[in-house]
């Protein structure tokens, strides 16, 4: 591994006491605040995979969107390479946004149905200015190679693709800016098990190649334990437990972690297909 002598000891991303509040309408009674993220602190270092695990509504997506600079927060801070996103100039923010890639659960949300694959990738390459105009076409081929899609996919529309292929295109778009931070928000929950494994492996291979930090969001603790160097467990807007996969699986005394672990063990499929062990 080569050491970048210009790099400081800052984590790539540092989240401190972050709070994100939504105002939810209560009809005649005005608005009620919902604290979706409630005092979260966490660090992400270059090249590491950190899994964010928690049940639906625990605040994972909201936290990820704030880290990506897409959702304002009500208290606390998010630093990228030691600079508070809130203090960044427009130019710095643009720079930050082009150096982070995001893929969501539903590729239909991130792909415009009227745009062919090559236009979707070309648009991203123009925005991120990864290569000069004349190199865009060659870079589109390179991106398709990176996600193991043949060049014939250039002229296809999202509707002509399978779920897995769409997710590959969404990943190609997300890496167009050669990101240092990659956020994967439930990227496999709409896919079959075998396709899911391919997509997860693709992200891990790209992490090895591009050395990005990856925030890997999932409901699936078993998957988190398999892919991440560190796991953060969220419940009701807070990180309630954290540690290496081995700590989470074997040593944690946290009640909620133990509940999640038991649920995962119950969900392991059995060969006879009976009992509580069937995948759900
Ligand atoms: N735009 C919004 N307006 C109001 N409340 C919201 C909004 N987005 C999220 N929330 C609320 O914030 C809380 C956290 O939601 P969030 O989507 O971050 O959870 P999540 O952990 O990603 O859930 P899931 O696993 O279902 O994706 C929930 O109570 C949700 O209802
Ligand atoms: Mg979510």
Image (cartoon, grey):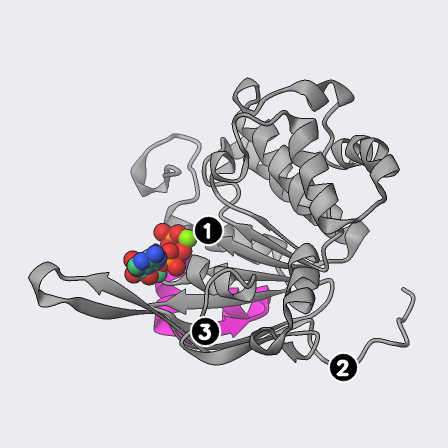
Residue 263 appears in the figure: no
Real-space Cα separation, disc 1 to disc 2, in angstroms? 32 Å
User: Mark 2 to mark 3: distance in Å?
Assistant: 25 Å
Asked if labels 2 and 1 touch by Cβ distance under 8 angstroms, the answer is no
Classify mark 3: residues with Cα within 10 Å, few (<14), some (14-19) or many (20+). some
Q: Which residues are magenta?
A: 242-261
Q: Position of residue 259 (x, y in %)?
A: 35, 63
User: Quadrant location of residue 160?
Assistant: top right
Query: In the drawing, what numbered circle is on residue 41?
Result: none
On the image, which quarter does residue 50 sit in? bottom right
The stretch drawn in magenta includes residue 259: yes
Kindly identify the residue that appears in the image at 51 percent across and 34 percent down.
193
Residue 96 at least partly seen: yes
**Residue 275: % across, % down:** 30, 38
Residue with the mark numbered 3? 241
SS at mark 2? loop
Specify the farthest residue to the left: 28
Residue assigned mark 2 = 9
Q: How packed is label 2: few (under 14 Cα within 10 Å), some, or many (20 or more)?
A: few
Foreground: disc 1 or disc 2: 2
In this view, the residue in front, 61 or 23, is: 23
Q: Which residue is mark 1?
A: 220
Q: Is residue 270 above or below residue 17?
A: above
């Amino acid at each position: 591994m080569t050491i970048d002598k210009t790099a400081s000891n800052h984590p790539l991303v540092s989240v401190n006491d972050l709070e994100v509040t939504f105002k939810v309408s209560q009809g005649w009674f005005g608005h009620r605040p919902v604290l979706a993220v409630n005092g979260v602190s966490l660090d992400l270092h270059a090249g590491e995979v950190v899994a964010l695990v928690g049940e639906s509504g625990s605040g994972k997506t909201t936290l990820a969107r704030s880290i990506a600079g897409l959702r304002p927060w009500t208290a606390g801070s998010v630093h990228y390479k030691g600079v508070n996103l809130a203090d960044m100039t427009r130019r710095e923010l643009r720079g930050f946004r082009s150096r982070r890639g995001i893929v969501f659960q539903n590729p239909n949300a991130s792909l415009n149905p009227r745009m062919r694959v090559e236009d979707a990738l070309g648009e991203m390459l123009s925005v991120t200015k990864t290569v000069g105009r004349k190199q865009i076409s060659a870079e589109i081929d390179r991106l398709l190679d990176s996600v193991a899609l043949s060049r014939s996919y250039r002229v296809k529309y999202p509707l002509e693709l399978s779920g897995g292929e769409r997710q590959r295109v969404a990943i190609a778009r997300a890496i167009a800016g050669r990101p240092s931070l990659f956020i994967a928000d439930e990227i496999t929950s709409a896919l079959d098990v075998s396709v899911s494994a391919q997509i997860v492996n693709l992200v891990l291979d790209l992490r090895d190649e591009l050395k990005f930090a990856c925030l890997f969001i999932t409901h699936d603790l078993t998957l988190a334990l398999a892919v991440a160097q560190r796991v953060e467990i969220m419940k009701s807007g807070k990180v309630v437990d954290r540690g290496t996969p081995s700590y989470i699986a074997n040593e944690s005394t946290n009640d909620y972690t133990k509940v999640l672990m038991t649920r995962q063990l119950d969900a392991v499929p059995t060969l006879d297909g009976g009992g509580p062990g069937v995948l759900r």
